[in-house]
Structures are given as structure tokens and as C-alpha cells.
Image (cartoon, helix red, strand yellow):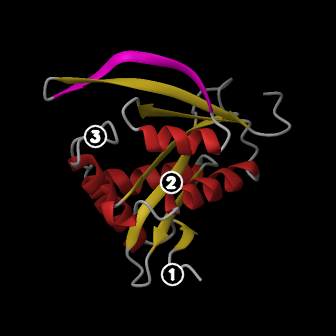
Amino acid sequence: MDPIRIVPTSTEAQIAGFNRCVDVVARERRYIGLVTGPPLAASAAFVRQVVADGGVHLVALDPDESVVGWCDIARHERDGFRHAGRLGMGLLPSARGHGLGRRLAAATIDAARTKDFERIELEVFGSNARAIALYKRLGFVQEGVRRRAWKLDGAYEDDVLMALFLPGSGG
């Protein structure tokens, strides 16, 4: 049995762990559009808002109950767009390469199905071939590319736009 558990984010310790994970991944400067994590209060407000708006926020916990990854789908706020949400995720370096990203994303998508999401969208850097392949395996399709959308340390990154249409949504 895999010692990693995937659970809805529900405790202050899990929120703090999520905040630490975001900071670690951000400081890698290659997977998400942040270079440092937000303050803990901002992460706590984000998680609470995602849940209050009918979104999904899950964390992956190791046997010591430490957060080693997260995946969330934040519902769009504006009328006319609320059938859709934006997926974000990340894993600590030590948690990568073991299928956890697939498990975490699949669990988040399954939870989104129970909350009447019809469309899940995401952005991923063009150089992140492993993530793009994972999203395609999960059923996401590429909708577009924003060329040279991100520039950091003198290097550009394309921003690949992808979406998943959930069954019964007309997609």
C-alpha cells in the first residue's frame, strides 16, 4: 500500500504544509509562475476561498503527515464562467517520479465531477514536457500557446493552455 494519502485540505497544519510546498516549488523557478511562495495568511485565505466557492483543494500527506504535494481547482468567480475552474498543482522534488502527480490530479478531477464542474483549465510551461504528457493522459487537450509569456532571468517560457471537458458537459 502506498504510504502517501490524498485528503481534502482541512487543518491549519495542512494549510501551512501547502504554503511550504508552494514556496519550495516556486523557488525552483521553473514549474509555476511564482518565484517565492505567498505569505501563510494569503495561502490560508486562498484555500478557504476555493472551498467556499465550491472548488477542490487536496493535499498529499506522507506517513509523518507532512504535505508533499497539492492540487486544487478554483472555480471561476464571474457569472457565465462558474461552470469552469482552474487547476493548479505541485509536488516537492522528493515526491516526483512515483506516480503521485497522476494520483493527485486524478483525485482532484474526480472530486470536481461531484461539484458540477464542466470544464477544467490549466496553464503549464512549454518546457515542462512531463507535466504536459501527464495532462494529456488525463484527457486534457491543448487549446493554445501564449508565446514568450513568461520571462525570468533573461529566459522566456511559452505558456501552454489546456482544458479538460468533463463527461456530460457538452465538451
Residue numbers of the magenta segment: 141-152
Q: Nearer the viewer, mark 1 or mark 2?
A: 1
Q: Earlier in the sequence, mark 3 or mark 1?
A: 1
Gap between marks 1 and 2, in whole Å? Answer: 18 Å
Residue on which the image places disc 1: 3
Q: Which residue is mark 2?
A: 71
Dot 3, crowdedness within 10 Å: few (<14), some or many (≥20)? some
Q: Position of residue 146 (x, y in %)?
A: 42, 17
Tag 1, which secondary structure?
A: loop
Residue 105 position, x and y percent, is 57, 53
Residue under label 3:
30
* Numbered disc 2: secondary structure: strand
- The foreground one among 26 and 103 is 103
As measured in the structure, the alpha-carbon distance from the residue carrying label 3 to the one carrying label 1 is: 28 Å
Residue 131 position, x and y percent, is 47, 43
Could you tell me which quadrant the N terminus lies in?
A: bottom right
In the rendered image of this protein, does residue 20 appear above or below residue 153? below
Q: Quadrant of residue 16?
A: bottom left
The answer to whether residue 44 of the structure is visible from this angle is yes
Q: Are marks 1 and 2 in contact (CB under 8 Å)?
A: no
Q: What residue is drawn where x is 32% and y is 53%?
A: 22
Please name the amino acid that badge 1 sits on: Pro
Q: Mostly what secondary structure, the magenta segment?
A: strand
Mark 3 or 2, nearer chain start: 3
Q: What amino acid is labelled 2 in the image?
A: Cys
Q: Residue at x 39, y 84 (%)?
A: 64
Residue under the point 40% across and 29% down: 126
